[in-house]
Image: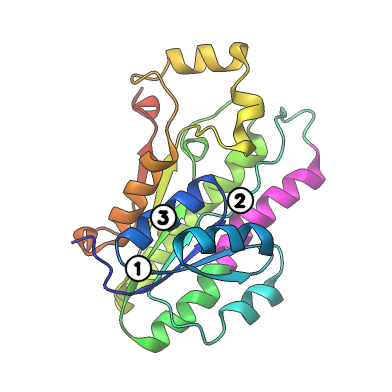
């Protein structure tokens, strides 16, 4: 049920921590993976490791996304590319950073969905999309006004896309991980005064790993989840059940 039989699946942020691990899982499940990102060098490394194809574009550029995806035969998409922004309160938020976070995390995912699904609908074989959101979309976290807002917008993009695309047999879901110690997140969350009180509120009491996020992504893309669309799936050790 998790064999993709050579289906073409695009993974944005495909050279990053969660994105790269997702590429590895999908390749093992016989998907034909296309890893996307801004850095040709980083994409070349994941391609050498896994044999995936690559495509380069900036999530902030509609023209680059449109040109990269036009005519691309796709069955699935993982919107994993993102920008962490800053740790700030509403009183001292840098609006330029806020705008960039929204541009990459929400607008970028919508643009990829826009142009990918045009191809998917034209091909007529259905498909699946998984948006990599965050627990910050579900609960308020200190300092996360920008990042949380971008991921909350992504949740609505997920639900509306599921509603609109179901008639084409295209499913759209999101996963909502807790902290994964990637280079983007470790600077803030590795600080003891930040980590200790946070982990005390989490029933499982530890950070997630890249594999623990990639596994549910692969499941939601797969035929094993063929009746699941429009959901958000917390991967947060129980943090949001409180």
Residue 194 coordinates in the image, percent (x, y): 60, 16
Please indicate, yes or no, whether residue 155 appears anywhere in the rendered image: no
In the image, residue 19 above or below residue 180:
below
Residue under circle 3?
24
Q: Is disc 1 surrounded by few (<14), some (14 to 19) or many (20+) residues within 10 Å?
A: many
Residue 138 coordinates in the image, percent (x, y): 46, 37
> Of residues 14 and 66, which is closer to you in this image?
14
Residue at the image position 41 percent from the left and 55 percent from the top? 24
Q: Which of marks 1 and 2 is nearer the N terminus?
A: 1
- Answer with left or right where residue 123 lies relative to residue 182: left
Residue at the image position 52 percent from the left and 36 percent from the top? 136
In the image, residue 40 above or below residue 100:
below
- Answer with left or right where residue 49 lies relative to residue 212: right
Q: Main secondary structure of the magenta part?
A: helix
Q: Which segment is the magenta one?
A: 94-111
Residue 66 coordinates in the image, percent (x, y): 62, 78
> Alpha-carbon distance for marks 1 and 3?
10 Å
In the image, residue 186 above or below residue 170:
above
Residue under circle 2?
82
Q: Which of marks 2 and 3 is nearer the N terminus?
A: 3
Quadrant of the image for the C terminus?
Answer: top left
> Alpha-carbon distance for marks 2 and 3?
19 Å
Q: Quadrant of residue 207?
A: top left
> Which numbered disc covers residue 31?
1
Q: Earlier in the sequence, mark 1 or mark 3?
A: 3
Q: Quadrant of residue 95?
A: top right
Q: What element carries label 3?
A: helix
In the image, residue 238 above or below residue 171:
above
> Alpha-carbon distance for marks 1 and 2?
23 Å
């Amino acid at each position: 049920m998790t064999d993709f039989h050579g289906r073409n699946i695009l993974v944005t942020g495909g050279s990053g921590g969660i994105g790269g691990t997702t590429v590895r899982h999908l390749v093992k499940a016989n998907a034909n993976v296309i890893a996307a990102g801004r850095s040709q060098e980083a994409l070349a490394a994941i391609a050498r490791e896994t044999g995936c194809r690559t495509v380069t574009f900036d999530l902030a550029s509609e023209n680059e996304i449109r040109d990269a995806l036009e005519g691309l035969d796709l069955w699935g998409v993982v919107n994993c590319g993102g920008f962490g922004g800053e740790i700030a309160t509403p009183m001292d938020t840098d609006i330029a950073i806020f705008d960039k976070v929204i541009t990459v995390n929400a607008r970028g995912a919508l643009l990829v969905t826009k142009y990918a699904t045009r191809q998917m609908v034209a091909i007529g074989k259905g498909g699946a999309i998984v948006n990599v959101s965050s627990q910050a979309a579900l609960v308020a976290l200190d300092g996360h006004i920008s990042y949380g807002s971008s991921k909350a917008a992504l949740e609505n993009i997920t639900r509306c896309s599921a509603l609109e695309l179901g008639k084409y047999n295209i499913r759209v879901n999101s996963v909502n991980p807790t902290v994964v110690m990637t280079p983007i997140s470790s600077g803030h969350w590795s600080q003891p005064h930040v980590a200790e009180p946070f982990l005390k509120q989490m029933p499982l009491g530890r950070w997630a790993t890249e594999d623990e996020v990639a596994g549910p992504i692969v499941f939601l893309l797969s035929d094993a989840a063929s009746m699941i669309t429009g959901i958000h799936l917390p991967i947060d050790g129980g943090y949001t059940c409180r």
